[in-house]
Amino acid sequence: MQSGWKSYFIFSKKEQRGIMVLGLILLSTMLMGILFPRKQTAIRLNQSMPLFYFDPNTIDSITALRLGIPSRQVTTLLRYRNKGGRFYHKEDIEKLYGLKKELVAQLIPYVAIKNFEKNIDRNTTYQKTFLNEYNRIDNRTRLVNDKSNNNSNEWSIDINLADEKQWAASTKLNPTIIQNIIRYRNYLGGFTRLNQLKKVYGLEESNFYLLKPHLKLGKMNNSKPNASSMSFENWKALGLFQDREIIKILRIRKENGGHIGWKELVILFDLTAQQAVMLQKSIQISE
């Protein structure tokens, strides 16, 4: 029987193979760590746009997006204010659910809340210093915002009068959603409230609140187009018929001396009850 420290380093062939396998595994793990270092998931905020002073109690949706605030949090901000909520201190923006701490840290120095003097003791030296600093920031805010804001925030759109091209140029909405807006407007015979736009299929509520400050509600033109004289574009604007179906309508109308009836279209194209009502409301057409 061998004794001494050397006896601890005597292994069988099976044990030797096991040690070699473990050594290869450790070595390959080290090489993988060197060749493919772990990427640190650091959150980087968009620094392409310069920050500027703003009041969270009056800021609009477009300006909030320019500050880097995500659309979901912009919607939360607008809902909070619509329900009577108000920000009294700079740090109150931390309460916006989902707003990342890194972004909050960047925005707080640029928060300038107006009309808070009544919350400060007017008899203290701190109050005078604080108000002077606020006035300095407020003046700078106006200067920076006047330089940074352009006419892109001053656009508006009439939801009763705008056509597809105007919607696309102003809102950048998906063409399918724009077509749904036009169809729903035609079905109603015109919007009577801005909130009716939320019922348009495919339009997310968050997008509605982003658009709402720029929406206007004009009077719908009551002069409906006449089925006997409607052009291809007029039929297309209804959103009920495909191009080949419109060509068929025009051909049938020509063969009938410029006349085509509502029941004829309903039966010919197998319109649903909802589509049939929408057609009757949207144009002047005989039974």
Image: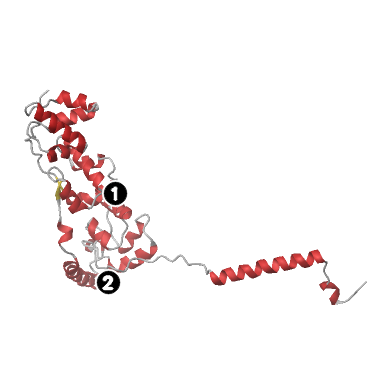
* Residue type beneath disc 2: Tyr
Q: Please, which residue is most extreme toward the right here?
A: 1
- The quarter of the picture where the N terminus appears is bottom right
Picture disc at residue 206 = 1
**Dots 2 and 1: beta carbons under 8 Å?**
no
Along the viewing direction, whichever of 275 and 79 lies nearer the viewer: 275
Reading the chain from its start, which is encountered first: label 2 or label 1? Answer: 2
Residue 90 visible? The answer is yes
Q: Position of residue 73 (x, y in %)?
A: 32, 55
Q: Position of residue 24 (x, y in %)?
A: 68, 68
Q: Position of residue 31 (x, y in %)?
A: 59, 71
Q: Quadrant of residue 198?
A: top left
Along the viewing direction, whichever of 156 and 275 lies nearer the viewer: 275
Q: Which residue is mark 2?
A: 126
Q: Residues within 10 Å of mark 1 (few under 14, many from 20)?
A: some
Left/right placement of residue 79 relative to residue 34 reads: left
Taking the spot 9% from the left edge, 30% from the top edge, the residue there is 254
- The quarter of the picture where the C terminus appears is top left
Taking the spot 22% from the left edge, 42% from the top edge, the residue there is 179
